[in-house]
Image (tube, grey):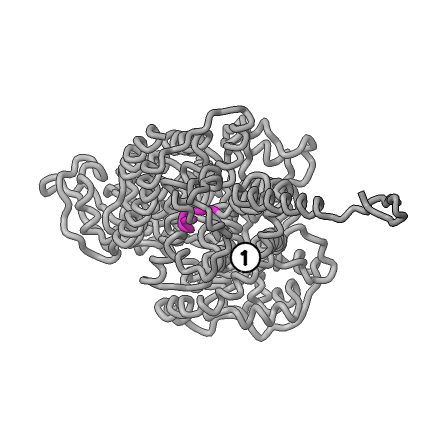
Amino acid sequence: MVFAVALLPLFLLLLAVGAPGARAAVELGSALATVEPGDLVPGADRFGPVEGAPPRAQALEGSTLRGYVFLNTDVVGAVGYSGKPIHLLIGLDPEGTITGAVLHEHHEPIVLIGIPERKIEGFIGSYVGRNVREFLEERDAGDRSLDIIAGATVTILVIDDAIRRTTVKMARTLGLAGLGTGQATEAPGRGEIDTAQEGVDDWMTLIGDGSVRRLSLSVGEVTADFAAAGKEKAAARPESDDPEERFIDLYAGLVSLPVIGRSLLGDAEYENLRARLEPGQHALLIAANGLYSFKGSGFVRGGIFDRIQLAQGEGTVRFRDRQYKHLGEVAADLAQPFAEVGLFIVPADFGFDPVERWTLQLLVQRAFGALDKDFLLYELSYTLPARYLKPLPGPAPAADTDSTAAGAISAEPEAAPELWKRIWEDRIVDVAVLGAAMIALTLIFFFQDWFARRPKLATSVRVGFLLFIVAWLGGFAQAQLSVVNILTFGNALITEFRWSYFLMDPLIFLLWCGTALALIFWGRGVFCGWLCPFGALQELLNKAARLARVPQVTLPWSLHERLWPVKYVIFIGLAGVSLYDLAFAERLAEVEPFKTTVILRFAHDWPFVAWAGVLLGTGLFIERFFCRYLCPLGAALAIPGKIRIMEWLRRHKECGAPCHRCAQECMVQAIHPDGHINPNECLYCLHCQQVYHDEHRCPPMIQRRLRRERRRARASANITVPTATTVGPSGTATSP
């Protein structure tokens, strides 16, 4: 125990390394002050003034120009998995070659708490020495093989896209690598969409004229492509032993067009789509069969699709869950059944031109180890058939990008409710399972006296419930509340609060609602004692340790009452830091081992794994050690828990004076020497209530039982017994 507490400052120090400063608007001038000129452009010894649009600064050696330095976010957007920008400082020489690139600021959760930042920095460094013309050649050839870091797919895709698009656009702006703004010519317009066209076509007609495009791959073809790319380990691990089996059969169509939309969606769904689309937005239908899912798993947990993206020109769109709607089928006549059908909205601020060629890029991943994967990129090319177009009457008016972007932003709150409803529909089974568990737990608490009077049943139900929480809620659903949720909620209240954000994860939302209601009735113990996967894991491991006769340590009360306030100090510190820098507070919040054990399943850097191991190991000797003394989430829940409206836990007048039986058996020492229960520390395991009603363990109840038995014994002795009569000498009957 002393070892674990001693490690806490060291652990916080490790987390603090590389912590960002106070968050503010990222500007190029202030960003340049954090790096040496030579780190971004070799030979440079100073930066010139920030100038131009997009803003950039010359990197100079004396008075000689060595290159240019700029922030990617000043040139193109780069929104990461977190929904916030990833800021990169990039250096470019006059020949259009990348001379340096550093990660300046980000808020990617997988990097903050999972993937080591040095791996991301190593990936960024791999672009140094590459010329922007290579990017254009690879784009035209469809060659986009990536060395993606396992667990950070979306982040890597965003960084790759940002570096490519930013450097090409800046090279065009500055006239580097022979590109020049004058050479970035567009092909003549093909015409404009004829919106007056109506009608419905069957599936075969849409396929035949190119209204719906197809990408079909077999397992053998994908294996051959992995081998050709030099990824032999992935090539040796095909998804099926049959090379002819369909890997994916992928179809895409532009359903924001009336004919294609009504044909593929049906009239009702198409009208819903029309009502939802804002000016400048478009929609795609994507459907697929086969062994490989184009959705992946990211859209469930983090709101982003990490296997598909739309590309047009130098830009790409990575779809988020608010731009997605699940469909059950393709409505067109003669269409085959599909395992996956989805409707995707292309945001207005992307500037998508439905008339020009675009591609749907599919990222194929294949695992060849527990954490090792290789990746390939395939493209489905789409050009709108000429029958949907009419000739341009004249020069097309310039798009009002400002008003379009503003429209997209203002429309988001209206679209959000539909988003969270769709997510809840997709996870309805998980919601039902968790809802049933919470209802059962509520019944246990409301009828706790009946429950506590049956100790064998109570013990069996509690162990079974904890096993369910560890295996299903933590292991399968990975729904673990964290103090980070509280910090984020508080940050949202003082910045821009939207309920839709918190509704995106149904299980987390349900847990928070249930926990909030439970605080009113019972305090923190409902969550901490019953619904926390890490807490349940600690308790089950301690029970196993007791069965193995591992000696248990009971801390002296004087030490115990001085240690339990530590968790409140940690929480207050985290809350204070979050007001200054939420990202840094999220780093420090890794004092909770929840992400390491539940979310990342110990696939983490060694300090985090070691910290989780120390806490779990200490818990074998001191039951619920982390919950008692270090958990900032428990502290955060204990503070509002003081407002509970009822005292449910029963006590005898003898509790504490003279009886200490419950206090000695309380697993977290939540019962004070005077006999009262500290609700801030109580985990509501109901063990004390089992003792309270037990006539063979609770001294007051034992005395009552003995008094009752003595009364019964006396009552039995006083029962009148009939006696025999005898006849005396006088002839009268007498009793002996």
Task: Give the residue at x 60% y 51%.
Answer: 437
Answer above or below: position of 51 versus 497. above
Question: Mark 1 Cα within 10 Å, few/some/many (few <14, many 20+)?
Answer: some
Q: Position of residue 249 (x, y in %)?
A: 64, 46
| Numbered disc 1: secondary structure | loop
Amino acid tagged 1: Thr
Q: Which residue is mark 1?
A: 383
State the quadrant of the N terminus.
top left
Does residue 79 appear left or right of residue 517 in this picture?
left
Q: Which residues are magenta?
A: 677-683
Q: Quadrant of the C terminus?
A: top right
Most distant residue in the right direction: 731
Residue 214: in sight, yes or no? no
Residue drawn at (41%, 60%), measured in percent from left and top?
Answer: 643
Seen from this angle, which residue lies furthest left? 62
- Which percent across, then down, holds residue 343? 57, 59
User: How many marks on residues?
Assistant: 1
Q: Residue 94: image x %, image y %?
A: 23, 43
Prevalent SS, magenta region? loop
Residue 54 visible in the snapshot? yes
Position of 731 with respect to 431 (left or right) is right
Which of the two residues, 8 or 95, is positioned nearer the viewer here? Answer: 8
In the displayed structure, 21 sits above or below 665; it is: below
Q: Residue at x 62, y 64 (%)?
A: 260
Q: Nearer the viewer, residue 24 or 519?
A: 519
